[in-house]
Image (tube, helix red, strand yellow):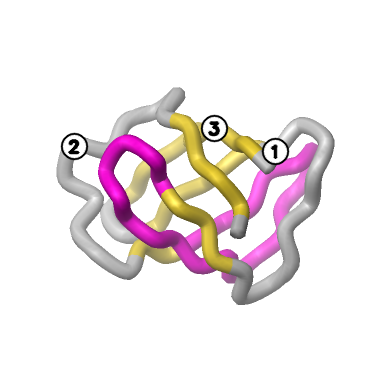
Amino acid sequence: MKGKIVQVMGPVVDVFFDSYSPSIYEAIRVDELHVILEVQQLLDNGVVRTVAMDSTEGMVRGMECTAT
């Protein structure tokens, strides 16, 4: 399932999924940077809060992600 980054706050990244809701601790891959995000919290309206397992340098809103 594809999602898009909506906010980057240091190692904390919020990701929006339109028709899919990842579970807690699920891995999400940022396609362009090859960085793995781990879901920590389910927010409203299809947004999940994640923690990056690597540097978020160069990560911006709108980048595509893939739930694993």
* 67 inside magenta stretch: no
Q: Going from the N terminus, do you reach mark 1 or mark 3 first?
A: 3
Residue position for label 2: 58
Q: Residue at x 61, y 75 (%)?
A: 25
- Secondary element under disc 2, as helix, strand or loop, is loop
The quarter of the picture where the N terminus appears is top right
Q: Quadrant of the C terminus?
A: bottom right
Query: Dot 2: few (<14), some (14–19), or many (≥20) neighbours within 10 Å?
Result: few
Task: Name the residue: 52% across, 46% down.
Answer: 14
- Residue 17 is tagged as 1
Residue at 40 percent across and 57 percent down: it is: 12
Stretch in magenta = 30-50
Q: Report, in whole angstroms, how far the alpha carbon at label 1 lies from the one at label 2.
A: 21 Å
Residue 56: horizontal and vertical position, in percent? 24, 50
Q: Main secondary structure of the magenta part?
A: strand
Element type at mark 1:
loop
Near mark 1 (Cα within 10 A), the count class, few <14, some 14-19 or many ≥20, is some
Of pointers 2 and 3, the one earlier in the residue sequence = 3
Q: CA distance from mark 2 to mark 3?
A: 15 Å
Name the amino acid type tagged 2: Gly
Between 14 and 38, the residue placed more toward the observer is 38
Does label 1 or label 2 sit earlier along the sequence?
Answer: 1
Which residue, given by chain and number where applicable, does mark 3 sit on?
4
Residue 36 image point, x, y percent: 39, 61
Q: Is residue 68 above or below residue 14?
A: below
Please give left or right for residue 20 compared with residue 67 in the image: right
Going 45% across and 53% down the picture, which residue do you hit?
29
